[in-house]
Amino acid sequence: MATAAASLRYFPSSLRKRSPGDASGGLVKLSHRRALSAARVAAPSREAEPVASLGDLTRVEFPILHQEFDGAKLVYFDNGATSQKPNIVMKTLDEYYRSYNSNVHRGIHVLSAKATEAYEGARTKVANFVNAADSREIVFTRNATEAINLVAYSWGLSNLKQGDEIVLTVAEHHSAIVPWQFVSQKTGATLKYVGLTKEEVPDIEQFKGLLSNKTKIVVVHHVSNVLGSMLPIEDIVTWSNRVGAKVLVDACQSVPHMPVDVQKLGADFLVASSHKMCGPTGVGFLHGKLDILSSMEPFLGGGEMIADVFQDKSTYAEPPSRFEAGTPAIGEAIGLGAAIDYLSQIGMQKIHEYEKELATYLYESLISVPNVRIYGPAPCKTDHRAPLCSFNVENVHPTDIAEILDLQHGVAIRSGHHCAQILHRTLGINASARASLHFYNTKEEVDVFVHALKSSIDFLTSEL
Amino acid sequence: MDVSSLAAALPSLVAPTMNLKPRLAFPLHPFSARGGGAHPRGSVAVGCAHSNVPPPLRRAADEEDQGEDADPRLRLHRLAEEFRAVPEAGRARRLLAYAAALPRLGDADRVAANRVMGCVAQVWLVGRCDGAGRMRFAADSDSELSRGYCACLISALDGAHPDEVLDVDPADLAPLGVAAGTRSRASTWHNVLVGMQKRARAAIAVREGRSPAGSFPSLVIGRDGTVRAQGSYAEAQVSSPPLQFCLFSFRCLD
């Protein structure tokens, strides 16, 4: 799409003038119109061009997407597992290590001051991105899994005891379940699971019924990485607070795809991973309300998280430092900040709108393939369906499908239990295939995927 | 011979009698041309359209194979050469043909005790030492491609001596990758091989009068001498007779 490429020259440069954290997307629309008029000027004799989609416009910034395997262009549909990174993130990482890498917080010299400023600047960017009240409410961790473990060990072990209940859903990711199993074994608290309705979403009525004054914490996903459905977090927080229970939200599949406002959601804890939101691996964050974080015991012990160290005891720093022992992933956190700048300049609402279109297109295209069964609610039955579909094809193993799609068509999807074995057992299956999209994917890629899927199914069933 | 009913009738560790010459009723399918060249992306039509019915997988257990031909490493090497001779687009089809010819295990064998851990698909493996001191293997999976991998490994290792099974290096599997370079599905090959080697090790131990189980990190041995399997994988292993023998001998030491 030459005109799209030409128009993109205007698109990214206008992005860099934007201030970070601005999620309105208003200026982006202006540059989009400029891009379109540039396109028309470039080719005045043509008919009105089809409008370049967000996917068309942004994918130029993601070099990894432009490769081929055996003559087939890569179609990357495994974003639920990890997202790709735009040039600016890689440039930021490179620049960090090339010009100002230095340990943070304690140094006196100019490099250390610069690194500290950039690192703490990244913390502020994360705080603004999720509308936290205070940047001290953002704790950098290795990823969302570590963030959940932090809450489990640091809050859970001190606050839960025999007879207490932890409420989860059967659709939770293993990272949201297993740490609480450890806590349950150590404290005697028990885990209670909310099941699914026949629409294959967590049963909210059952959830309300499970809440009692024994419930001390509710651990739920915001958007399911298998079902694609979204939970009503604000309502869940309201109901949970009535019984005195805290709420931890696993926002790994929501923060990268839509505006998330922690003050509006009202949860006590919220976690996300950088690598799912166009940032580097090795960093993630926990958002926790400041008064709760202030009351929590440390998680890992070591340098940075102490105030004073004596032979027999130590005093601990205030949050967030209390929970950030040792040298952090400095460059990676700064890279996450650059990813947040990039996403903000597009606008999370704009990303969300585009992905809603993609989600519906993906679902409707996929369901038209014979013998395909998609899990989770249909788009017409729900307010929100993420741009992902976990599915099975009758009599064909999902791993075989994924393998043939990869080998013969260059299409990358995932097959397995997607770190949700309990959910798969609930659905009565061992494994499923999953195609998960992000804003740099396009409807054309969905068409390629569906064609390749039909071809792969033919290939695999023609032997039987 | 109806393998599945035979397998159901026998205890789970006895390998069902294998069809020595698997029947391949595999016509050249019209889709093989369509799946390739008709599609502008990727797969090559020519290889598919010209792919012949692959030769049946011969195995070390065949009576005609004596001496060196029965060495698993050589058989794997030969299999790798056969694969390399097939255009890439045809290799998956070849695996599927092998899968079609692989007898299915009966329900009695498709149990947790026989699961090969670490595979995305479910894979079951049975193995034992026969009266002539050779390892006999059978395997199955709910994934057709995995069945193809299993068929290849069984053709190479079924009927081999336990020491020969142990001699196979996972690196010997690398040339068998269905795709070129590093995109082979190493895990299924590797995990099934590891499973076969474990059973070979157990057979050697029994032959030498030792306890058949090696060191097993998932066992928890209490101070009072009780031995507890930790986790479903370990529990599945505990239920298998060689390890039960091992636990029995532990308890006897009190």
Image (cartoon, coloured by chain):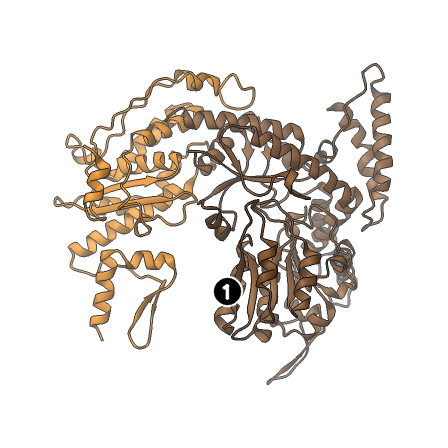
Chain colours: A brown, B orange
Counting from the top left corner in percent of width and height, residue A49 is at 79, 21
**Chain ID at mark 1:** A
Counting from the top left corner in percent of width and height, residue A281 is at 62, 51
- Residue pushed farthest bottom? A312
Residue at 72%, 31% in the rendered image: A56
- Residue pushed farthest top? A45
Q: Is residue A79 left or right of residue B225?
A: right
Counting from the top left corner in percent of width and height, residue A141 is at 64, 61
- Quarter of the image for residue A11 reads top right
In this rendered view, identify the residue nearer to me: A87 or A99: A87
| Residue behind mark 1 | A181
How many numbered circles does the render carry? 1
For the C terminus of chain A, give its image quadrant. Answer: top left
Which kind of residue does numbered mark 1 sit on? Gln
In this rendered view, identify the residue nearer to me: B35 or A6: B35
- Quarter of the image for residue B230 reads bottom left
In this rendered view, identify the residue nearer to me: A2 or A52: A52
Mark 1, secondary structure of its residue: helix
Residue at 60%, 74% in the rendered image: A159
Counting from the top left corner in percent of width and height, residue A143 is at 61, 57
Whether residue B47 is visible here, answered yes or no, is: no
Q: Is residue B239 left or right of residue A339?
A: left
Whether residue A344 is visible here, answered yes or no, is: yes
- Quarter of the image for residue B102 reads top left
Residue at 22%, 66% in the rendered image: B248
Image vertical order of residue A394 relative to residue A217, above or below: above
Q: Is residue A413 left or right of residue B159?
A: right
Residue at 63%, 83% in the rendered image: A310
- Residue pushed farthest left? B131
